Image: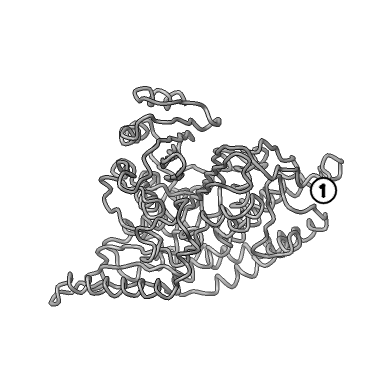
Amino acid sequence: MEGINKALEPFDTEYVEAYKPTWIKAKLKSPDDIVAVAEAMRAEGLRTLSTVSPTDWPDREIMEINYFFEDLETKRNCWIKCEIPREPERCEIDSITPVMPSAEWHEREAWSMFGVRFRHHPDLRYLIISPDYYGKFPFRVDFDMAAHEADQMEHVKEIVRDFKSEQETNDAELDPDGSEMVLNWGPTHPASGPICLKVRCDGEEILSIDPEIGYVWRALENLVTRKDFVGAIVAVERLCFMDNINSMTGYCMAVEEIAGVEITPFARWMRTLLGEISRISSHMMGMGNFYNTMGLHTAMLWNLDVREYFLDVLESYSGARIATAAIEPGGVRYPLDMKLMDELQKALDKFDATIGDIEAVFAKNPTMRHRARRIGEISAEEAVDWGLSGPVLRASGVRSDVRLDEPYAAYEEVEMDYVTVPGGTAADRFQVLFEELKQSVAILRQAKKRIEEGVASGEFDPAKDHLVKVPKKLPAGEAVSRVEWARGEVLMHLVTTEKAKSPYRLKMRAPSFNHTMVLNRLLQGKTLSDIPLVFGSMYVCQGDLDR
């Protein structure tokens, strides 16, 4: 951490302080220094910008901008803050995208939601929001969301007008005698879900891809501010239904930090156990979707069969298979009936009985290996620069996993290692998913054994140790928490005001954002038939992409 402190010495700061063992926190006196700071961070090895998180303070007439820099290799991080005026005409700061490629979409999102203009950004267009929100900046505190939503029909007309105008622009720009065209891949392509890839191509060759996202935007970061701290988990878990447990854990960790609350060892192990079940649920879907993109649907059916047994465990614990609301500030929501361990054992037995067949038929499938090893290659350097994370990052050989880099729940006591392969191709990303399924099962066995032994010895009381009290009102503060979600790093930036009953601001940084941002780089020069397989290998979920 000394290197980060030295890198910040040339700049005029209000403070530089140790925030966590792997984090330095600093506030700049002048926002004009931000590009130079980004250059200093990059020179020091912090080459990834995790996200940009504005916080709107209308009473103080400022917009506070938070930057989260990460060194994915040496596990050092730096949180930089600065303030700019919030008046729309003066709400601007220099873009760091020329220094940090991973900042590109995060700055576009901050512009779209908060009206922060990033000078010298290479492509500062609106992102996620539909045309009826353009220039209105829906995440500003004084934006009236209810009033805006009252006239839905006019908004639909505006969206249609924008689409027609765009098609006319495409027609005008293209040479009528040439072979170039613009194709809309989606927004309801069977391999993608609700996303539109605007593909500029010359015959079958892809010239460029411009992802258009936001078709399932739910304004989750705004929605949580309308709920109390416990009620907010219903919105947080909808970041993506395929791994709802770990997103709730990340949010609750931030709440607990501000509240000054420590959860019990039993609750830590329960979060680990439930989180790995949720990871398996997501990975099973991810592997099935990978094969779906090639038109091979049997793999999905086989995986869904195994996945049902793990969903049975979540249902036995919470009463729900998908939207479980099983994690809340203070621990886990429900006491533990030890019969749940019998249900878990059934799932583990089913996994053991079928994983060999899945590996033989699918993971070692020669057709898949030949097809997927030729496309979608991402080097370790590119993966770091673009802010990729999770299985996608580890498939490029980068040893990064928040469970190991910044342990939470009970992961400090878990025996595990990084699951990496060096190739960075679409096939390598599938291989990491497959290997991580086996890793999660191994972690589940450890968690199961530790909980059973703790209950048997009297160390854990499963009827009482699941939850500690968290005040309904929190003090003013802010916290950053990170978890290793199924798809990669989820970062939560939580801000509260004095005696708050609900979050003032919650930024949810999720991995599909960066994984979609890199599609243009991966597919330029490839053919149209490569799009589904490359897209499927990036392990994108529309929920966390659009939020």
Q: What element carries label 1?
A: loop
Q: Splitting the image into 4 quarters, where does residue 368 fall?
A: bottom left
Characterize the local packing of mark 1: few (<14), some (14-19) or many (20 or more) Cα atoms within 10 angstroms: many
The color scheme shown is: one colour
**Between 217 and 114, which is closer to the camera in this rendering?**
114
Q: In this view, does 317 lie above or below 452?
A: below
Look at 43% across and 63% down and name the residue there: 214
Q: For mark 1, what is the residue?
A: 462
Q: Which amino acid is tagged 1?
A: Pro
In this rendering, would 416 be left or right of 377?
Answer: right
Instruction: Residue 480: give x, y in percent of width and height.
Output: 54, 40
Give the percent coordinates (x, y) of residue 395: 46, 51
Q: In this view, does 433 lie to the left or right of 345?
A: left
- Going 53% across and 63% down the picture, which residue do you hit? 287
Q: In this view, does 365 lie above or below 445?
A: below
Q: Quadrant of residue 33?
A: top left
Q: Say which of 498 and 546 sits in front.
A: 498
Tell me residue 530's x, y (percent).
Answer: 35, 67
Q: Could you tell whether 412 is left or right of 17 in the image?
A: right
Toward the left, the furthest residue is 177
Q: How many labels does the image show?
A: 1
- Picture layout, residue 64 above or below residue 123: above
Left or right placement of residue 451 versus residue 306 in this view: right
Q: Nearer the viewer, residue 52 or 133?
A: 133
Identity of the residue drawn at 55% across and 68% down: 361
Q: Where is residue 164 in the image (x, y as percent from the top left)?
A: 29, 75
Q: Which residue is drawn at 67% across and 67% down?
A: 308
